[in-house]
Image (cartoon, rainbow, N blue to C red):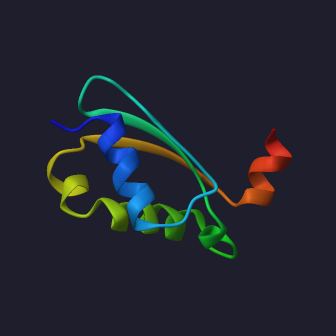
């Protein structure tokens, strides 16, 4: 069964993040805040694709819904 912790671990192993939080306890619907330098100069779609890449087959087979907020460190600090 997929958990918010397993999703967070997979994202963290697949890309460098400054801040990463994944929430959701029903096993199918999750929310993620991913802050990474990798998002600099990327569109929202490209950012989401990068996160999906870290999840691989898990995204296609086990996770029903993943709502994401993907920010650069600068964007994240400006929103705080």
Give the residue furthest to the bottom: 41
Which residue lies at the image location 36% right of the left edge and 61% below the top edge? Answer: 52
Which x, y percent locates residue 16?
54, 66
Q: Quarter-wise, where is residue 53 in the image?
A: bottom left
Which x, y percent locates residue 10?
34, 55
Between 29 and 74, the residue placed more toward the observer is 74
Asked whether, in this view, residue 65 is left or right of residue 32, the answer is left
Asked whether, in this view, residue 49 is left or right of residue 6, the answer is right
Between 49 and 72, the residue placed more toward the observer is 72
Which residue lies at the image location 45% right of the left edge and 68% below the top edge? Answer: 50
Which x, y percent locates residue 54?
35, 64
Quadrant of the image containing the C terminus? top right
Q: Quarter-wise, where is residue 33 in the image?
A: top right
Asked whether, in this view, residue 75 is left or right of residue 43, the answer is right
Between 46 and 74, the residue placed more toward the observer is 74
Asked whether, in this view, residue 37 is left or right of residue 79, the answer is left
Which residue lies at the image location 18% right of the left edge and 61% below the top edge? Answer: 57
């Amino acid at each position: 069964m997929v958990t918010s912790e397993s999703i967070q671990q997979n994202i963290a192993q697949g890309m460098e993040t400054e801040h990463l939080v994944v929430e959701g306890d029903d096993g199918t619907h999750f929310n993620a805040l991913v802050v990474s330098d990798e998002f600099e100069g990327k569109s929202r779609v490209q950012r989401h694709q990068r996160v999906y890449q870290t999840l691989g087959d898990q995204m296609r087979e086990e996770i029903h819904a993943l709502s994401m907020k993907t920010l650069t460190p600068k964007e994240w600090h400006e929103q705080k």
